[in-house]
């Protein structure tokens, strides 16, 4: 589905700019360097870096690492560390301290998966979370035993645990295995994927939390970069797609053992659009201000103000995904004093302005 959405973005660019491109789709597994002998190609957009692409042919690499053996290559960055950090941080804030990463057999060609494994291990250590990895052998994955592998892995995890799948397809396998083995989601195990395939995420039971990194947008900009290279331009503007956590039912539960902390977090979530004060949050939780502030520092690696801001930013992102409200209205609805302050805080948190974020999440990548 990722590759399909990338292609959709390329086709969108071709149509928008009325380009006379003839596009030839080649599966990575069936790629043959002799293609460049039998037929003339002007440029390549690749999900994975194909070996054998002549250096004289412009090459746009989608997966985010510069291809050193191909001097004419440019890349659309995929920050796998940032993706995993969002996932770990999300589960940590929910109260999950036992975290696992599930994926496919560890093959050299799956460089994106290896990057996510390395980032997961390091970030869990940074957070103080207990981490485990579940990656079947190639023999197990290709046989009928992969489902048994998942069921045994899930039932071996302590409750509660947070599970991150390397993509939505693997997350769907995990949800099916949980159903077969009687593991309750998210009460016992929270599950989240990566890619935000809306069809898979919405049809899964429960609906799947995932991280969106906008592959159609990447395809659109990859086509733009290739178009610029074919026109002889030397200065190519780099592009890094934004990331967005889309929470659904598979992680929609707080599991902190500290009931006062749970109460405080729920109060913040429900009143994010109001003028929240730390004293009011503490009073509602039945604790002193100093106690609440200490809980947030020690158990969330955060502060009350940061959590209030995070709740407001999350609310703003949801509203920005719809074009029917102005930035001024969104700022007011999300508890910000004015548009200028909202823009400043949003850009500091998300890395881009609210307007740029809205542009990045609309369905039409143009």
Image: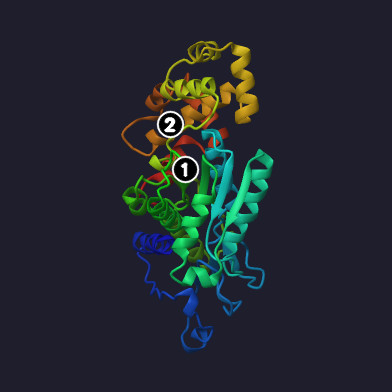
Q: Is residue 177 above or below residue 300?
A: below
Q: Position of residue 163 (x, y in %)?
A: 51, 47
Query: Residue sitting at 43 percent across and 31 percent down?
Result: 316
Marks 2 and 1: CB-CB under 8 Å? Answer: no
| Eye-nearest disc, 2 or 1 | 1
Numbered circle sitting on residue 316: 2
Q: Position of residue 44 (x, y in %)?
A: 50, 72
* Residue 42 visible, this angle: no
Q: In the rendered view of the protein, which quadrant contains the N terminus?
A: bottom left
Q: Position of residue 19 (x, y in %)?
A: 38, 67
How many numbered marks does the figure carry? 2
Q: Residue furthest bottom?
A: 38
Lower sequence index among marks 2 and 1: 1
* Foreground pick, 307 / 53: 307
Side of 359 where 164 appears, left or right? right
* Foreground pick, 77 / 176: 176
Q: Secondary structure at mark 1?
A: strand
Query: Residue sitting at 61 percent across and 51 percent down?
Result: 132
Query: Residue sitting at 41 percent across and 76 percent down?
Result: 24
* Residue 55 visible, this angle: yes
Q: Is residue 187 above or below residue 72?
A: above
Q: Position of residue 70 (x, y in %)?
A: 63, 72
* Residue designated by label 1: 190
Measured Cα–Cα span from mark 2 to mark 1? 24 Å
Query: Residue sitting at 47 percent across and 22 percent down?
Result: 268
């Amino acid at each position: 589905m990722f590759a399909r959405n990338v292609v959709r973005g390329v086709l969108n660019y071709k149509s928008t700019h009325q380009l006379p491109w003839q596009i030839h789709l080649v599966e990575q597994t069936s790629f043959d360097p002799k293609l460049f002998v039998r037929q003339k190609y002007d440029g390549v957009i690749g999900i994975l870096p194909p070996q054998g692409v002549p250096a004289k042919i412009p090459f746009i690499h989608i997966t985010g690492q510069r291809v050193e053996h191909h001097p004419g290559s440019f890349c659309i960055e995929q920050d796998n560390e940032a993706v995993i950090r969002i996932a770990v941080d999300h589960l940590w804030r929910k109260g999950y301290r036992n975290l696992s990463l599930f994926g496919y057999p560890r093959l050299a060609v799956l460089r994106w998966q290896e990057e996510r494994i390395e980032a997961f291990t390091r970030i869990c250590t940074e957070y103080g979370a207990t981490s485990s990895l579940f990656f079947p052998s190639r023999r197990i994955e290709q046989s009928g035993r992969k489902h048994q592998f998942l069921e045994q892995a899930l039932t071996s995890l302590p409750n509660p645990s947070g599970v991150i799948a390397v993509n939505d397809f693997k997350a769907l396998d995990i949800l099916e295995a949980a159903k077969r083995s009687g593991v309750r989601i998210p009460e016992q195990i929270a599950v989240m994927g990566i890619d935000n395939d809306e069809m898979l995420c919405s049809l899964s039971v429960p609906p799947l939390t995932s991280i969106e990194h906008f592959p159609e947008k990447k395809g659109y900009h990859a086509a733009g970069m290739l178009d610029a290279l074919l026109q002889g331009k030397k200065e190519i503007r780099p592009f890094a797609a934004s990331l967005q956590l889309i929470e659904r039912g598979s992680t929609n539960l707080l599991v902190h053992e500290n009931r006062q902390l749970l109460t405080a977090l729920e109060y913040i979530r429900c009143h994010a659009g109001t003028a929240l004060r730390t004293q009011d949050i503490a009073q509602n939780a039945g604790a002193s201000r100093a106690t609440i502030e200490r809980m947030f520092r020690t158990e969330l690696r955060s502060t009350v103000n940061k959590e209030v801001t995070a709740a407001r930013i999350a609310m703003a992102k949801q509203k920005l995904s719809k074009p029917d409200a102005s930035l001024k209205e969104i700022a007011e609805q999300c508890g910000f004093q004015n548009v200028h302050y909202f823009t400043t805080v949003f850009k500091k948190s998300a890395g881009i302005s609210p307007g740029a974020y809205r542009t990045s999440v609309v369905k039409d990548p143009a």
